[in-house]
Image (cartoon, rainbow, N blue to C red):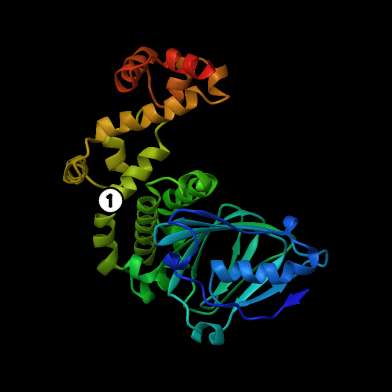
Amino acid sequence: MTENGERTARPQTAARPGSAGSPMLLLDTAAVPSADHVDAFRAAMGQASVPCRIDHLEPDGIRARMHLWAFGRSDLFTADVSGFRLTRTPRHVRMEAPPVVALAVQAHGQGRFTQFGRDQLVGRSDLMLSDLTAPYSFSWTGGGGSRAFQTTYDQLGLPVDIVRKASGRLAASPLHDLVQGHLQRLSRTAGRLATDPGAAALGTATTELVRALLASAAQDERFSRPVLADTLLTRVMVHVREHLSDPSLGPQSIARAHNVSVRQLYKVCAAADLSLEQWIIDQRLEVARAALISSAGLRRSIAATARAAGFRDASHFSRRFRTAFGRTPRDWQQDRRD
């Protein structure tokens, strides 16, 4: 089955219906008559991306579920789709569309991406950078899933040549795993995070991480050093959230992971009026508070929950918890059971 229609330009975030942060189910083919699948797919892609050709590759029909989650001026486009091919030609590029860059993580299936003369097989959990201001093709057969964070060039603050230079070098950057993990967690909890009052700030922080990754991967001293300095606090905060369960997490390990001195780390935190050690404890307490009343947390000991949140000593955890929330961990659990 082939669909050769041209799609309309991707709308700016502010033009999308609904308030900022509102989740949008673009398409669920299970709820659409099969005769309308092609048109529905085209319409959904028209809301989520830029003009391109769409070819459907599966003889058994189209299966798709797509969401668009707004995070301020950026968005997260999630798609689980049967086999298809997107082709963006020079003619499509000449159509009016905002200058968008998309950093995607493959959720399942294997994709094939071609841009700037490079072919890339995109396996599960791999990152893929698409410069939507230039021609490209992307496809998979059988089925697959992609989670694409889309932002504009003006938000990235990087020139085109740096973005394109970085596109084939993402895996070589020391920031690759940090950004990959962040996008995966953002995708898993997008439904909750996109409706949070902090969604726009989260979108800005994610754009900063993408900016840092691209500047690092491009290995251009004109941009890598200043961008890494500008984004240090954002990267530190993401790193901390990823390693809360590690009881050895602290200023020394954080500074070492980001190749800076402990003095420089404290200086950056002080400029943001952030007490690093207290913030780490606060984050651990929030994780533990949610875990205690989860279905798994209600079945395990409080000491086990404390260890999972990075606390070495259950008594210390209980004291900190009561000081922060006015209840002991056991009382907190009991309140939720009642």
Q: Is residue 322 visible?
A: yes
Residue 248 image-quadrant placement: top left
Query: Crowding near pointer 1: few (<14 within 10 Å), some, many (20+)?
Result: many
Q: Position of residue 310 (x, y in %)?
A: 40, 26
Q: Is residue 174 visible?
A: no
Q: Is residue 249 above or below residue 58?
A: above
Q: Nearer the viewer, residue 102 or 165?
A: 102
Q: Residue at x 48, y 22 (%)?
A: 292
Q: Is residue 258 above or below residue 104?
A: above
Q: Residue at x 47, y 21 (%)?
A: 305
User: Furthest residue to the front?
Assistant: 18
Q: Position of residue 210 (x, y in %)?
A: 39, 59
SS of the residue at dot 1? Answer: helix
Q: Which residue is mark 1?
A: 232
Q: Nearer the viewer, residue 243 or 98?
A: 98
Residue 59 image-quadrant placement: bottom right
Q: Position of residue 176 (x, y in %)?
A: 44, 54
Q: Is residue 211 left or right of residue 290?
A: left
**How many numbered marks have been drawn onto this rendered protein structure?**
1
Q: Residue at x 37, y 43 (%)?
A: 239
Quadrant for the N terminus, please: bottom right
Residue type at mark 1?
A: Leu
Q: Residue at x 28, y 57 (%)?
A: 228
Residue 162 image-quadrant placement: bottom left
Q: Position of residue 330 (x, y in %)?
A: 45, 13
